[in-house]
Image (spheres, rainbow, N blue to C red):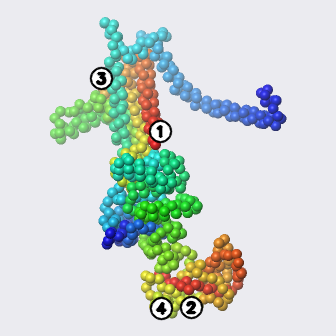
Amino acid sequence: MGEAQTKAPGTGTGSQVQASAERARKARVRAHWLLNTPALIILLCAASGPLFVVIIYSFLTPGDYGGIEWAFSLDGWFSVFMQRDIFEGTLSVADAHMSILWRSVRLSLLTTLTAFVLGFPTAYFIATRPRETRNVWLFLITIPFWVNLLIRTFAIMELIRNKGVINTILMSTGIIEQPIQMLFTDFAIMVGMTYVYLPLMVLPIYASMEKFDFRLVEAGYDLYATRMKVLRRIILPLAKPGIVAGSILVFIPSLGAYVTPRILGGGKNMMLGNLIALQFGQGRNWPLGSALALTLLAMVMVALLIYVRGVAKQDSGRH
Amino acid sequence: MRGDTDFAVQVKGVTKVFGTGAQAFRAVDEVSIDIQQNEFLTLLGPSGCGKTTLLRMIAGFEHPTAGQILLDGAEISHLPPYQRPVNTVFQSYALFPHMTVAQNIAFGLEMLGKPAGEVRQTVDAMLTLVRMAELRDRRTDQISGGQQQRVALARALAPHPKVLLLDEPLSALDYKLRKDMQIELKRLQSETGITFVFVTHDQEEALTMSNRVAVMNQGKILQLGTPRDIYDHPAERFVADFIGDTNFLNAQVVNSAGGKVTLKLTAGEEVTADLPGGVAPPVAGDSVTAVVRWEHAKLTAQGAGQLSGTLANVVYVGTDTHYYVELSDGTTFVSRIQNSRDDELTFSEGMPVGVSIESNGVQVVRN
Ligand SMILES: Nc1ncnc2c1ncn2[C@@H]1O[C@H](COP(=O)(O)OP(=O)(O)OP(=O)(O)O)[C@@H](O)[C@H]1O
Ligand SMILES: [Mg+2]
């Protein structure tokens, strides 16, 4: 400030103008923050707050009847990955947890893939209908959302159980002798999750296909590309943002799914969501539940990171 | 080469009907046209006359309802676009937005399964040809309209097609760039020796660039000929009206002999008119339409020249002056005269004047 005063009068008024501009800018920023408070409060209370609680809980000791004791312990985190033999006290990898983790990842990937294989042609079909009829198709796609998740899941159960629709038809037509065991298998979980999350794949892909300039397809044909080549070299690359968004939207809820594996997987075929619920319920081990929940969160974030980096690399890799 | 293969493309009685029943619409109506090897042929016509539809049938995006399309003498109507050695420069350019300039140009060559070395060489040659070498690694949404146009051209030329189809490729460009690109296109055509079929609704563009022009209206080709033919000897009223500025005079035939027709105009004067090839000679007493180009008539003093009337309006347009003369029957006749520094004869509005038409300036057209 002192330096500014020693300057020529002309620049003095200049810096006054600057100072008042600066004050106005600061006022604007303050007003901005004020307007943002509701959003910030919601973010803090609804997102960061519970997360913070879960982080703290994961480092505490389980209470005898659920809940927690306020004593620091790493047992929760420890039990996520390792287990101690009750009798001999030896340490080993927590096989049960690992297999549940692996099943979650595997089934979520399979679900995402299946949803893509079914969802992409669907989205393409809708995007290539005349403008007036597209909304009807979109409406049909979203209808299942209106029905309670439990009911939809029970409907799938009705289809695939041993005396369900599919097995009855197959047996009465003599194609099979014995019913095929589909319910309470990983396959059932995957079918259920694909069914439930399919719209989440279709809608983003449709959104990116809708903007797609189909004259580019003609340009491709004109330049000697066959149908497959046009799909691979022109349509898929341009639909990629939608495909990425759809895959993320399907993969993440699949990873933490609770209702579908619970009903269609039976008691044995647990996924992470069920394991976490178990620890907060019958298991009465809230710190372990919290640590498992945070592990799930970490996995989701790693998956997202890999995806995002992969996409960025591909984009910058183009010459 | 002999017989039919003297032609790059032959369109034989091709009709395209869109829709069915009451909705049916004939976009192209029994068009036949033989396009010569290495020709620059232009389809010229007003909006909606079927130019794009005809082009799309040659490219293979639409299938003719009736008729045949031959390429180098072989029938191609049943082939999908990717099996036709024909490339298109789209009106919208349709460049692939997820590829660079060089990748766009390489696309067709890669799809043809050319070895990588050859692809690279051809792409380089094409980039030089269209003067885009510095921008080879730019994304196509990061270059100007004129540059996009050149990339579209290079992309279509790279596989060295037998025929290049261009659908109003210059219409999105400003006047100056358009002029440059017209010259560029002519240069590319003569350097590559490829047959060009060019679509435009700009008559000046058609006349300056083409070896031949096909004038279309309502799905039909009305006249096919060199730019001179089309301009100097329009055979149809529509052609005379669509190309150039033209006066139309109603007249009755007095007598007709040896390609010359003596007409009595509704305005009263008698004039001698030419009969272009393809117009059936009329007989005495027939009602016909005679055309006179604006620039083929001059103003003279009253009493001189073939026509007389009153000068109704004088419009100065820079290079020219347009004189609007009202003839005795009420029709307006326009004469366009190029301005020069030493104009000594000046006419003012309201003056009675004469109109002198150059020899061979009057011509009979089909209605
Ligand atoms: N797919 C289609 N379905 C129905 N009618 C069509 C279709 N494509 C074109 N038409 C009609 O056929 C006619 C000719 O269309 P075309 O696109 O060939 O005109 P154009 O001469 O290229 O016009 P412009 O100069 O405006 O591009 C138009 O009346 C158009 O409405
Ligand atoms: Mg068109």
Chain of the residue displaying label 3:
A
| Left-right relation of B47 to B16 | right
Are discs 1 and 2 less than 8 Å apart at CB?
A: no
What residue did someone put label 3 on?
Answer: A268
User: Of discs 4 and 3, which sits in the foreground?
Assistant: 4
Residue A107 visible in rendering: yes
Disc 1 from disc 3: Cα separation = 45 Å
Q: Residue B54 in the image: x percent, y percent?
A: 41, 65
Residue shown at the point (42%, 16%) measured from the top left? A77
Residue drawn at (47%, 16%), measured in percent from left and top?
Answer: A57
Q: Which residue is mark 4?
A: B256
The disc labelled 4 sits on which kind of residue?
Ser
Name the spot of residue A44 as percent of width and height, x first.
55, 25
Single out the mark in the foreground, 3 or 2. 2
Mark closer to the observer (1, 3): 1
Contact flag, marks 4 and 3 (Cβ < 8 Å): no
Tell me which amino acid carries mark 3. Answer: Lys
Location of residue A18 (image quadrant): top right
Vertical arrangement, residue A267 with respect to residue B286, above or below: above
Mark 1 and mark 3 on one chain: yes
Instruction: State the residue position of label 2.
Output: B270
Relative depth, front residue between A196 and B66: B66
* Viewer-nearest residue: A96 or B156: B156
Alpha carbon of mark 4 to alpha carbon of mark 2: how far? 13 Å
Q: Depth check: give the residue in front, A313 or A76.
A: A313
Could you tell me which chain the residue with mark 4 belongs to?
B
**Are discs 3 and 2 located on one and the same chain?**
no
Q: Which amino acid type is shown beneath numbered disc 2?
A: Glu
Secondary structure state at the residue bearing disc 1:
helix
